[in-house]
Image (cartoon, rainbow, N blue to C red):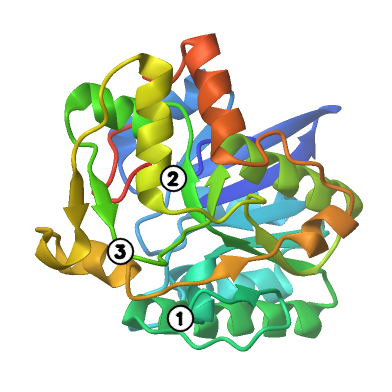
Amino acid sequence: MGVPLRKKLICDSPEAGATAIFGTTRAAEKFEALRQAGIEPLQFDGSLSPDLSGALEKTTHLIISVAPDEAGDPVLNVAGDALKANMPALEWIGYLSTVGVYGDHGGAWVDETSACRPVSKRSVMRVAAEQEWLKLGQEIGKPVAILRLSGIYGPGRNALANIEDGTARRLVKPGQVFNRIHCDDIAGALWLLADKNLGGIFNVTDDEPAPPQDVVTYAAGLMGVEPPPEIPFETAQLSPMARSFYGENKRVANAAIKAAGYRFQFPDYRVALERMWADGNWRDGEPRSPMRGA
C-alpha cells in the first residue's frame, strides 16, 4: 500500500520472506516510475494477461481504484472469475470510491448510513460498482472495504501549487462546502483496514468541510501573496464536469474510519497546507485536474 493512487490495481503478496507489491498501469512507459517506487509494474489494458493472472494467484491484499464505465467495473468484467476461483491467498479487498455517491444533501451532514442519491452519471456507476464488489466479497467470504474518498490533494495537487502556476480561483457559491482528503491519509486508512482485514463502508475524508475559496485564501496567506479576486459562481467559466461538482453540497462525517482506529495526519486543510509549505514539498506531484486543490 502507500503507492501512487493513480495506479489501478495493487497486489500485495509475500514472496521470499518479503512483501512484494504489484501495481498496474495502462501505459508501459510508466513502468520505470513504478519500479523506482518499489512496485513491480504490470500492464492492465482491459484484458487479463498471463503476468497479471500470475500476480493475482499470489495476492493477499487487493486494492482497486479504476473507475467504472457504462459496461460496469473494468476489473470485475475481465477478472471476476479469477477473483472467485484463482486467488487462494486472498485475504482482503479494498475499493476506492467517492463521496460523490451521496449526491446532493443541501449542505447537511451525511455518514455511511445516509442515502446514496448520486447526481452525476459517474457517481451512479460508482454506486453500482460498490455493490458489485460487496457482492463478490460475500460470495467468496472475504472482507471488502469500500473507501469513499473526498477531494484528493497533496504534494503537487493543492492550492499552493495552483497559486504559483496561476490557476487558483476563488469561486464563491454561497453555502457551498467541500470535504477534502490528503493522499497520505488515504494510504494510512488503507494500511489500517488491510492490516486488520476490516470490511465495510468508510468515509475517508477530513474533519472540516469548508468553502473552496477559504482554502485558496489561506494558501495565499502562507505564501505572503494577495489571493486572486472572488468570482461569483454564476459567472465563472467552468467545464461541465467542474460545474457538476458544485451541484452537490454536503458535509461528510468520518466517524466510522476513526472508530476503526485511524487517526488523521491532516485533519483539515490548514494543517496540511502548513505542513507542505514548511516541508517545501508542495510542488511535487503529477499533473493536476481542473478541480485540483478545490
Q: Position of residue 41 (x, y in %)?
A: 48, 36
Q: Residue at x 29, y 39 (%)?
A: 288
Which mark lies nearer to you, 2 or 3? 3
- Mark 1: amino acid: Asp
Q: Which residue is mark 2?
A: 6
| Earlier sequence position, callout 3 versus callout 1 | 1
The reply to whether dot 1 and dot 2 touch (C-beta < 8 Å) is: no
Q: Residue at x 33, y 44 (%)?
A: 292
Q: Residue at x 81, y 67 (%)?
A: 199
The mark tally for this picture is 3
Q: Which residue is nearer to you in this view: 99 or 29?
A: 99
Instruction: Work out whether residue 158 can be spotted.
Output: no
Q: In the rendered structure, find residue 104 and report the number of the disc placed on it.
A: 1
What is the spatial separation of the Cα atoms under label 1 and label 2, in whole angstroms? 26 Å
| Earlier sequence position, callout 2 versus callout 3 | 2
Instruction: Give the answer, above or below, for where 105 lies relative to 225.
Output: below
What is the spatial separation of the Cα atoms under label 3 and label 1, in whole angstroms? 15 Å
Q: Position of residue 229 (x, y in %)?
A: 18, 39
Instruction: Give the answer, above or below, for where 200 lies relative to 239.
Output: below
> Could you tell whether 159 is left or right of 109 in the image?
left
Q: Residue at x 54, y 11 (%)?
A: 279
Q: Position of residue 62 (x, y in %)?
A: 67, 55
Tag 2: Cα neighbours inside 10 Å, few (<14), some, or many (≥20)? Answer: few
Q: Which residue is mark 3?
A: 173
- Kind of element beneath mark 1: loop
Q: Which residue is nearer to you in this view: 215 or 149?
A: 215
Which mark lies nearer to you, 1 or 2? 1
What is the spatial separation of the Cα atoms under label 2 and label 3, in whole angstroms? 30 Å
